Image (cartoon, coloured by chain):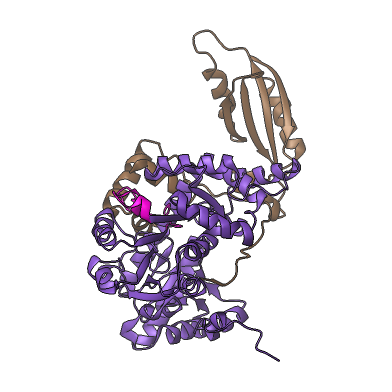
Chain colours: A brown, B purple
Amino acid sequence: MREKILQYIEKNARIDLHELSVILGEDEAAVMNSLEQMENEHIICGYHTLINWERTGIEKVNALIEVRVTPQRGIGFDRVAQYIYNYPEVNAVYLISGNFDFMVTLEGKTLREVSEFVTEKLSTIESVMSTRTNFILKKYKDHGTIMVDRIEDERMKVVL
Amino acid sequence: MRNPLSRNITRIQPSGIRKFFDIVSEMDDAISLGVGEPDFDTPWRVREEAIYSLEQGRTFYTSNAGLMELKEEISQYLDRKYSLSYNPRSEILITVGGSEAIDIALRAMLDPGDEVLIPQPSYVSYLPCTILAGGTPVIIELKEKDEFRLKADSLKAAITDKTKILVLPFPNNPTGAIMERKDLEEIADVIIENDIFVLSDEIYSELSYQEEQYTSIASLPGMRDRTVYINGFSKAFAMTGWRLGYSCAPKDITQQMLKIHQFAIMCAPTTSQYAAIEAVRSCDPQVEQMRQEYDRRRRYLLDRFRNMGLKCFEPFGAFYIFPSIQEFSMTSEEFATRLLEEKKVAVVPGTAFGDSGEGFIRISYAYSMDALKQAMDLMEEFIGELRK
């Protein structure tokens, strides 16, 4: 049942409990228990809102930063990662296979704010060897949701 | 001047609820739950394959019966899904939608005077196609108390010595009814005993919401050789506009169907055939995802109707729900017209699918959850007002 619940609420966080239990064909109390348990176990880590900021007129700048680091003896990458993810400006930190070590996503108000953060905070962390900043120019799709305009329902009104 | 028209075609009546359809099409802002086609886009990988085939210049006729590669994929798919075994060289025919397959199967099998049993409520083409093929349609009325399944005794009662074909329209449009294995076994005995043939329209076979494994009548002992199995890409793969279906039948029947297909159609659209290879080969996960989404909507609607106190049997197939509106003592058409005029919600009167649909409305759940919610809220208001 957990997988069923998670699959659905991943895309529909706001659904109410009764409706969720109806559409999954499960008992309401059981669904509630399962949700509570998964929240306690931090399987469900939050209920966020997917916002297309571009349509609000409010300026936001997003960047993907490739970071190369020297892993530290005994603790590997985790300590450096902690140094990075503790900054609230940082949205996500992923350890990556390939040409660099971390992919860090950042959100700031202006280009300058982001670049200042990279040069002053990120690059100065001991064991960070180099960074490369990629600014996001346009979001076409985010979290599995297409952000650009799509055609409306063009079906006929009645089809037998 | 002489009458240019054939008596056979002019005696086919246009749908009795034309008037209702005219009102719907003029109302731009209505929320419609009247569409019998998926709301999903065709999976991108399928569309992409079609584009690629065009880029490659694959724009010629295919062989009459369809691309061998597609027929081979279909053969494997039917085996994997339904344990059906058909020879792609001689028993599978690619058609322009399931609709063409229905038409040419009837034309290949009927002689004047042959009777065709058509359970209703059901899709609207069986009856006119029977007439056009020179056959005589005989209606079997399905009943709500049987969950609109075909029962052996109603079948027996309709059989005469002229009966040649039984149309088996399950999972059913408009009722959403299905036939489980035990239901099929019961009628199979009657069919074999009376030596009749089955035209099994299983276009909604992928959209079945019961735990029990889906069973095709063609997979039952003794049935394969007397069944024309019809399926297609429209519903399961969300490919209605591609116009692609297929029939599977013993060689003798397929050969004659192929003749008609060859002279009337030549071949099914080439681009669609290339796209369909990708669909049938690698879209099981997408089909399953769509099925699950339909199933959620189905449960949601059923719950809403129960809360409204509207009588409704649980449908386990297709994407339709068929609630009863008999308590309001008006016809389905009156109900649908008033619902449209007063709340701007479009549903289809059950009588569009035969007289036995009187007292019911067809609601399609090939719509987003948001649209369904909005429509259900309005319908609840409407019913509340009627009951006052």
Of residues B24 and A77, the one drawn nearer to the viewer in this rendering: B24
Q: Is residue B155 above or below residue B272?
A: below
Q: Residue furthest top?
A: A73
Quarter of the image containing the N terminus of chain B? bottom right
On screen, residue B336 above or below A107: below
Position of B27 with respect to B360 (left or right) is: right
Tell me: residue B54, above or below residue B164. above
Magenta residues span B201-226
In the visual, does A62 lie left or right of B66?
Answer: right
The residue that appears at 29% across and 67% down in the rendered structure is B147
Q: Quadrant of residue A80?
A: top right
Nearest the viewer among A54 and B380 is: B380
**Magenta stretch: dominant secondary structure:** loop
Displayed quadrant of residue B95: bottom right
Residue B177 location in percent, x, y? 35, 64
Is residue B219 found inside the magenta-colored segment of the image? yes
Q: How many marks?
A: 0
Residue A17 belongs to the span the image colors magenta: no
Place of residue B245 in the rendered image (x, y in percent of width and height, measured from the top left): 54, 55
Residue B52 shows up from this direction: yes
Percent x, y of residue B367: 51, 63
Residue B373 horizontal side relative to residue B144, left or right: right
Q: Residue at x 31, y 71 (%)?
A: B312
Give the image quarter of residue B331: bottom left
Residue occupying the point 55% across, 58% down: B97
Between residues B261 and B310, which one lies in front from this camera angle?
A: B261
In the picture, measured across the screen, residue A116 lies left or right of residue B206, that is right
Assign the C terminus of chain B to one quadrant of the image. Answer: bottom left
Q: Nearer the viewer, residue B343 or B92?
A: B92
Residue B183, how many percent across, how many down? 26, 59
Can residue A24 be seen at all in this image of the molecule?
A: no
